Image (cartoon, grey):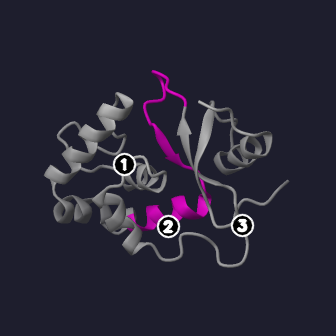
Amino acid sequence: MPEASRQDRAAVARQLGRTPRPFRVAARCPFGLPSVIENERAREMPTSFWATCPSLVAAISRVESTGGVREARELVGEGAVEEVHAEHHALYGTRVAGVRASGSVKCLHAFTALHLADAVPNPVAEWTLERLQRPYPKNACCTPEE
């Protein structure tokens, strides 16, 4: 995995509020900063892709807070979710972090990060992205430099 630049490491640290584990930038926001990272494979960090942009995370959280997980599960269907899981498992050796053991959706963030990274495009993320209202600020980055 290529090492992230010093500027990207600093931006992700500001976004997360902590020093990140090794990662690569998997997607960028319209302002050029990381919005999704791919984590280095580690036993204690099973999530392959992680949304880091605070505005993107908040927008997805708003969808989740209004029943989005349940609605996505019902509309997308467990069969489609299992297909995403199977593809993710074949590529990365783990389940998608946003999938319950039963195969149903439990977190829209993981599916959306996976999709935005172009790792495993998926219908859960497409459903989520259709419902996001301005996932990024209009005029300025939400991760100002210190």
Provide the residue designation for mark 2: 59
Residue 111 location, x and y as percent? 37, 52
Q: Is residue 52 on the magenta stretch?
A: yes
Tell me the amino acid under the disc marked 1.
Answer: Val
Front residue (pair 45, 114): 114
Which stretch did the figure color magenta? 40-63
84 left or right, relative to 44: left
- What kind of element bears circle 2? helix
What whole-number distance in Å separates the C-alpha atoms at marks 1 and 3?
Answer: 26 Å
Provide the residue designation for mark 1: 120
Residue 14 location, x and y as percent? 72, 48
Q: Badges 2 and 1: C-beta atoms under 8 Å apart?
A: no
Tell me the number on the disc at residue 141.
3
Q: Is residue 95 visible?
A: no
Classify 36 as above or below 64.
above
Structural crowding at the residue carrying mark 1, measured as other residues with C-alpha within 10 Å and reported as few (<14), some (14–19) or many (≥20): some
Q: Quadrant of the N terminus?
A: top right
Foreground mark, 2 or 1, reads 1
